[in-house]
Amino acid sequence: MKRVFVTRKIPDEGLDLLREKCEVKVWEEEVPPPKDVLLEEVEQVDGLLCLLTDPIDSEVLEAAQKLKVVSTYAVGYDNIDLQKARELGIVVTNTPGVLTEATADLAFALLLAAARSIVSADQYTRAGRWKSWGPRLFLGQDVFGKTLGIIGAGRIGSAVARRARGFDMEILYFNRSPKPELEKELEARRVELDEILQDSDFISVHTPLTPETEKLIGPREFSLMKKTAVLVNTARGPVVDQKALAEALEKGEIFAAGLDVFEEEPIYEDDPLLQNPRVVVAPHIGSATFSTRNRMARMAALDLIAVLEGKKPDNPVN
Ligand code: DGY
């Protein structure tokens, strides 16, 4: 029987499929397996089902003696050395599509929560600090009819844009290639990055993390944004320069931020962003709905099994 290592307890929908066909070992802890465990486990397995928190670098891939497939339980695969995998003939697969709508929902939830200080208002109310209806209490930004700038108009970025049309928002997008369907369906306009930064009331980041997009949004970019702007990031933390974001908020260069992803995850307890009431944070839960996570588990398991059975997987990335 083929051997598979699963680096965390994914939903049973995926584990059951794997167990029907393979000998499966699951890392049961709440935190990822340490590197030495990963190196040891990967050595003798045919398949690895990993998470975005596992660095599948050249050391890990080279430690594997007979690994045929790395199936990641995520759409993003910036944690995997694709070039090394290709060199070693290891297939890498991911879980695109199934998490689009859940992640877009969360991006929009963060956008609204940051615009209207929902989390601070909740804490204020619970703490018994609410004395009276206040004409200046928790003033926020309008969302309806405003301009949304999408950075990276792939599946998730486009799904966020679709939600924004329900709020009668104007859509700008920055993307390597034009998206005629988006322009036709939503009257979205493709513009340069600086135009997005200058003209948008809300900016939502959806680009994958690559060497080109790392710290794409830094001090210069914040200085171009409107003072009333709200930044949302549900993609990958390092696309935004986190220190620059904290400073921009501190200096009043932008109004607020809604963040599901961070340069370091978990975010350090003493990070200044956590002290700022204008920042709404979540622990990387974009795809965290019951049905989405079940579908991701199934997809990741089926692709892993397909490769081990010598078939073509549905979602190869290399
Ligand atoms: C992904 O899939 O890349 C998300 O960040 C987590 O679902």
Image: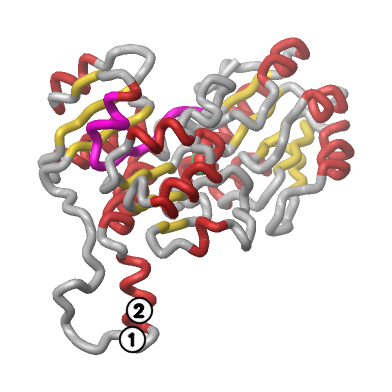
Quadrant of res 221:
top left
Disc 1 packing (10 Å; few <14; some 14–19; many ≥20): few
Q: Nearer the viewer, residue 13 or 53?
A: 53
Q: Is residue 199 magenta?
A: yes
Q: Nearer the viewer, residue 124 or 94?
A: 124
Q: Mark 2 sits on what residue?
A: 124
Q: Is residue 103 magenta?
A: no
Query: Secondary structure beneath disc 1?
Result: loop
Query: Secondary structure beneath disc 2?
Result: helix
Residue 17: percent from left, percent from top: 60, 41
Disc marking residue 167: none
Amino acid type, residue under disc 1 in the picture:
Arg
Disc marking residue 129: 1
Q: Quadrant of the N terminus?
A: top right
Give the Cα distance between marks 2 and 1. 6 Å
Q: Which residues are magenta?
A: 195-208
Kindly indicate whether the residue at mark 1 contacts the one at mark 2 (C-beta within 8 angstroms). Answer: yes
Which mark sits nearer the N-terminus, 2 or 1? 2
**Residue lying at 24% horizontally and 41% vertically, measured from the top left:** 201
